[in-house]
Image (spheres, rainbow, N blue to C red):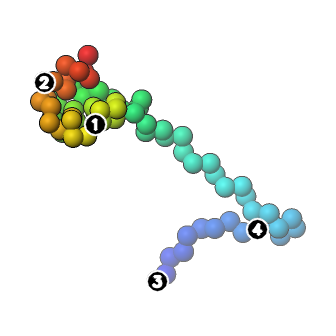
Amino acid sequence: MMLRRYHPRPDAESGEQDPPHPPPNDDNGPDDIERPARSASKAEWVAYAVAQGADQDDAEQSTKDALIERYGG
């Protein structure tokens, strides 16, 4: 059985379709990233540091304690 996605039909009189829906406003930028718990893995702290503007290689070479001190406040 073939399933099809729903596509609205154009209005018969005006030839217009419904306006497209705007993209969701789920801005997952750096400001939306929650600071990890102190007990979180080093990988989580690296990801958080990079989201805060750290260089990936520098963050990976830092210790977890150093990342917490610099980015954990």
Upstream in sequence: badge 1 or badge 4: 4
Q: Which residue is mark 3?
A: 1
* Residue at position x 26%, y 23% in the image: 71
Which residue type carries mark 1? Asp
Cα–Cα gap, marks 3 and 1:
50 Å
Q: Residues within 10 Å of mark 1 (few under 14, many from 20)?
A: few
Query: Does any portion of residue 44 appear in the rendered image?
Result: no
Per the rendering, the mark at residue 10 is: 4
Q: Residues within 10 Å of mark 4 (few under 14, many from 20)?
A: few
Upstream in sequence: badge 4 or badge 3: 3
Q: Residues within 10 Å of mark 2 (few under 14, many from 20)?
A: few
Nearer-the-camera pick, 56 or 8:
56
Q: Nearer the viewer, mark 3 or mark 2?
A: 2
Per the rendering, the mark at residue 4 is: none
Q: Which residue is mark 1?
A: 55
Q: Quadrant of residue 29?
A: top left
Which residue type carries mark 2? Asp
Upstream in sequence: badge 3 or badge 1: 3
Q: Nearer the viewer, mark 4 or mark 3?
A: 4
Residue 44: x %, y % from top left: 22, 36
Q: Which residue is mark 2?
A: 65
Q: Secondary structure at mark 1?
A: loop
